[in-house]
Image (tube, rainbow, N blue to C red):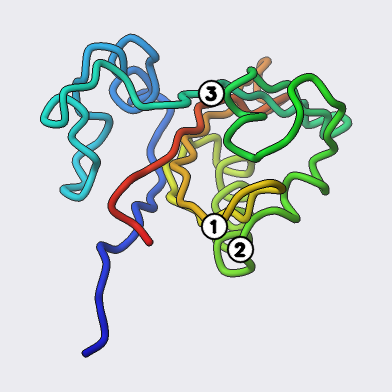
Amino acid sequence: MKQTYPLPVHHSWPLYERDRFFELGQIHECDTLDPVPDLVDFAAIGRLRPPQLGEWECDLWDNSLTWSDEVYDIFGLPRGVAVTRDESVALYDERSRAAMEKLRAYAIRHRRGFTLDVEIRPAQAGPRWMRLIAAPVCVGDAVVRLQGLKFLVSGHR
């Protein structure tokens, strides 16, 4: 019998809802990030925050990345090494990479945030699922960078 797993979270949301979907304090306090029912309930498993919650940023001018130590850990890379966007995206499963690139382009074009579960293949570990939360940062009418959170999601295999 084929085993089934929950479907990954994937959706776009308007920037005026940023606080509800993205704010670090909400994650620390275990409030729900969004209305999708298959979110991991960290409060129910006795955690105040997801393990390996990492912050990231991508400058759209040159695609340079800034990662917290936890994001390096999620991707199985040595902390502090220079990682290009191309190198990090290469660690995504092909289907997850395609979905992420589509939502990323939509987010930039329409100035919307997004939440997406992606399968990654870390450099020093087996495949795993990561929740990616992203929001554009705008200067005037221009989106200048994306920033967000990444953390491991249990319940997907």
39 to the left or right of 74: left
Mark 1 and mark 2 in contact (Cβ < 8 Å)?
A: yes
Task: Point out the tag, 1 or 3, that comes first from the N-terminus.
Answer: 3
Task: Point out the tag, 3 or 2, that comes first from the N-terminus.
Answer: 3
Q: Residue at x 27, y 67 (%)?
A: 5
Name the residue that disc number 1 marks.
127
Q: Residue at x 47, y 34 (%)?
A: 133
In percent of width and height, residue 85 lies at 79, 41
- Which element is circle 3 on? strand
What separation in Å lies between label 2 and label 1 (alpha carbons)?
Answer: 9 Å
Relative to 11, residue 85 above or below: above
Query: In which quarter of the view is residue 141 placed?
Result: top right
| Residue farthest to the bottom, as pictured | 1
Q: Amino acid at mark 1?
A: Pro
Name the residue that disc number 2 marks.
93
In percent of width and height, residue 12 lies at 41, 45
Relative to 27, residue 90 above or below: below
Q: Quadrant of the C terminus?
A: bottom left
Q: Residue at x 84, y 25 (%)?
A: 81
26 to the left or right of 45: right
- Which element is circle 2 on? loop
Q: Residue at x 30, y 13 (%)?
A: 28
